[in-house]
Image (tube, rainbow, N blue to C red):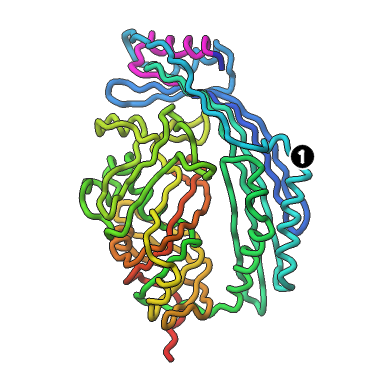
Amino acid sequence: MDKFTINEVLREAARRGAPFAEIYFEEKNNFGLVLEEGKIEKVSQGFEAGAGIRVIDEKGRTAYAYTNDLSLDALLKAARVATLGLNGAQETIALKNPLVAKNEIKIKPEEVAAEEKLKLLKIADEEIRKLGPEIRQVQAGYGEVEAKVVVANTEGTYVEMEKTRVRLSVQAVAEKDGVIQTGYDAIGTTKGFEIFQENNVESLARVAGERALKMLSAEPAPSGEMSVVMAGEAGGTMIHEASGHGLEADIVQKRMSVYAGKMGQKVASNLITVVDDGTISGKYGTIPYDDEGNKTKKNVLIDRGILTGYMYDRLTAQKDQVESTGNGRRESYQHKPISRMTNTYIAPGEDDPEKIIREVKEGLLVKKMGGGQVDTNTGDFVFEVSEGYLIEDGQVTVPVRGATLTGNGPEALNNVLAVGKDLGWSIGTCGKDGQGVPVSDAQPTLLISNLVVGGTGRIRRK
């Protein structure tokens, strides 16, 4: 996408009355492999390119048109579609010198042979199967995306950036005496193929396989209100779902968030600080600029229990008369940007994780979270526990299965009694409004009192 073409498209939108117009160009290569039962189940490779044109009128209403025909005529036609119904010419501002963000990677994924990528999946498969005959099924997947993006608008913004992501995931299914359990783990980065020099695939595979095997001998989880220790390695699912979405400005402005109207108020324990940071090197949700051309930042959302900020894109920032926080993200050129998380986490505290467990007389240790549901209006949530253990007299004892956690996001954060020094990250694809974007989330070890655990068993009494 050359500068002349960009100028012509923006000029056309302004000439037709657009107070603000933006063009988002994307060129993307994808490659993926799935190995199942030791055999290649799926190979995918693709290339796509296109551009989206967004127009915003004086009332904040948005029109969006996109095309995969990158000829000037096609782009001008898209600009005319996006400006239908507008009147009066607007002035354009000359594009500034481009802000260029290059990938900080050592080994480009596209330069690594497919056989090397397949070899990683075979290593994972073999490592899990070594764990025993109870392993019935293994699936390993590899994916990579390499993209070039240009964002420009009638205010003069002009950003060029590269995006690279690499991911490897493993899932094991174990069975014994009719009981079936699964274990899952994944790694992902915005770096290059060097991730596999920095992370051991065998270790990743063993974690997933051993998780499935441990849960085979697990007892039914107890039920009732109790203390819950969420290990750092459990990942940041709870903070992402129970609080993160409720801190996205569009949800807040629609009054669909439990955090609406609570700026400056206490919404969590004073031990809790929540941050969204798109600048952390190598994390799966990291981007140098958001998909509106704004530089990403470290945004403190909750500071020692006090609500201090929301995550803004351009439109929501204009509505609240603040600056964008660099959280305008989109799945592809076919989607308009909306406020989204990047890397969201609870900041580490000062407590020793092992000491936190020792101080619990009776409760549940969550080593890995599963899926769940959250109502952003109320903050109420229900989460599954993929790997959990009883805590009895300060000791981790038997594994339990079938546990769920039920509660309310702000209430749970207010009931945090201890925050560990550690910080465990997890990766995922976050869905919202029909769009999926890559994110990371994390938390330290947390001790939460009075959380409702659902299960079919009982607390063991000595």
Q: Residue at 42% across / 23% down in the picture?
A: 54
Tell me if residue 1 can be seen.
Answer: yes
The location of residue 386, given as percent across then percent down, is 52, 66
Horizontal arrangement in the rendering, residue 165 relative to residue 326 (left or right): right
User: Which quadrant does the C terminus fall into?
Assistant: bottom left
- Mark 1 residue type: Ala
Horizontal arrangement in the rendering, residue 141 relative to residue 304 (left or right): right
Counting labels gives 1
Q: Residue at 27% across / 58% down in the picture?
A: 270
User: Quick one: 48 or 202, which is closer to the camera?
Assistant: 202
Magenta run includes residue 10: yes
Magenta run includes residue 211: no
Q: Decide: few, some or many residues near mark 1? Use Cα within 10 Å; few <14, some 14-19, many ≥20.
A: few
User: Which quadrant does the N terminus fall into?
Assistant: top right
The residue furthest bottom is: 462
Horizontal arrangement in the rendering, residue 204 relative to residue 55 (left or right): right
From what the image shows, is residue 158 above or below residue 125? Answer: above
User: Which residue was labeled with disc 1?
Assistant: 113
From what the image shows, is residue 302 above or below residue 371? Answer: above
Picture quadrant where residue 183 is located: bottom right
Tell me if residue 66 can be seen.
Answer: no
Q: Which residues are magenta?
A: 3-23
Q: Residue at 44% across / 86% down in the picture?
A: 460
In terms of secondary structure, what is the magenta stretch mainly? helix
